[in-house]
Amino acid sequence: LGVAVNFGLWWVVFAYAAAFLLYLPRSLTLTMRLISCDLSSYVRVLWVTAAIALIGYLAYGALAWNIVLPDALQIAVAVCIGLAMVAGIVLIRRRHLLGQARILGLTSAAP
């Protein structure tokens, strides 16, 4: 990271992101060992979220690439896409979320 400072801000950002991504597998291994979780269970739970996030990112990118919008409208579009992504995740994962809520005692036992 120190070398990247000599090349400018974008290189610092790139170097930080690369360092984070390179250390990510090790940090996941340590964290998952603490909570007794294997990688396949972790991926099985997060694949829906990752797929919807990618779809939202691509939708915003396609919109921003093809249509020039004022800054305030860009923020509003990003918020709307984000809310639609959250709603999509909740709709797809509702059974799992309700099961977790029942375990925590947040809902009644009836579905």
Image (cartoon, rainbow, N blue to C red):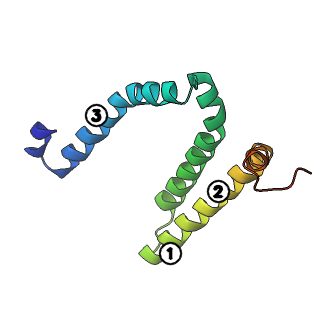
Q: Which residue is mark 3?
A: 19
Kindly identify the amino acid type of the residue bearing the numbered disc 1.
Answer: Leu
Q: Considering depth in this image, is 76 or 30 the residue closer to the camera?
A: 30
Relative to 41, does residue 12 appear above or below in the rendering? below
For label 2, the crowd category at 10 Å Cα-Cα, with few meaning under 14, some 14 to 19 and many 20 or more, is: some
Per the rendering, the mark at residue 108 is none
- In this rendering, the answer to whether 106 lies above or below 72 is above
On the rendered image, what quadrant is the N terminus found in?
top left
* x 62%, y 43%: residue: 49
Q: Is residue 94 above or below residue 1?
A: below
Q: Element at badge 2?
A: helix
Q: Given contact means CB atoms under 8 Å apart, are the residues at marks 3 and 1 in contact?
A: no
Residue type at numbered disc 2 = Val
CB contact under 8 Å: marks 3 and 2: no
The amino acid type of the residue labelled 3 equals Ala
SS under mark 1? helix
Cα distance between the residues tagged 3 and 2: 29 Å
What residue is shown at x 7% (from left), y 44% (from top)?
Answer: 6
Disc on the earlier residue, 3 or 2: 3
| Residue 41: image location, x then y, percent | 63, 27
The residue identified by callout 1 is 73
Front residue of 27/84: it is: 27
Q: Earlier in the sequence, mark 3 or mark 1?
A: 3
Crowding at mark 1 (Cα within 10 Å: few <14, some 14-19, many 20+)? few
- Residue at coordinates 53% horizontally, 57% vertically from top-left? 60
The residue singled out by tag 2 in the image is 86
Q: Is residue 94 left or right of residue 38?
A: right
Q: Nearer the viewer, mark 2 or mark 1?
A: 2
Left or right: 18 in relation to 88: left
- Residue 59 % position (x, y): 58, 54
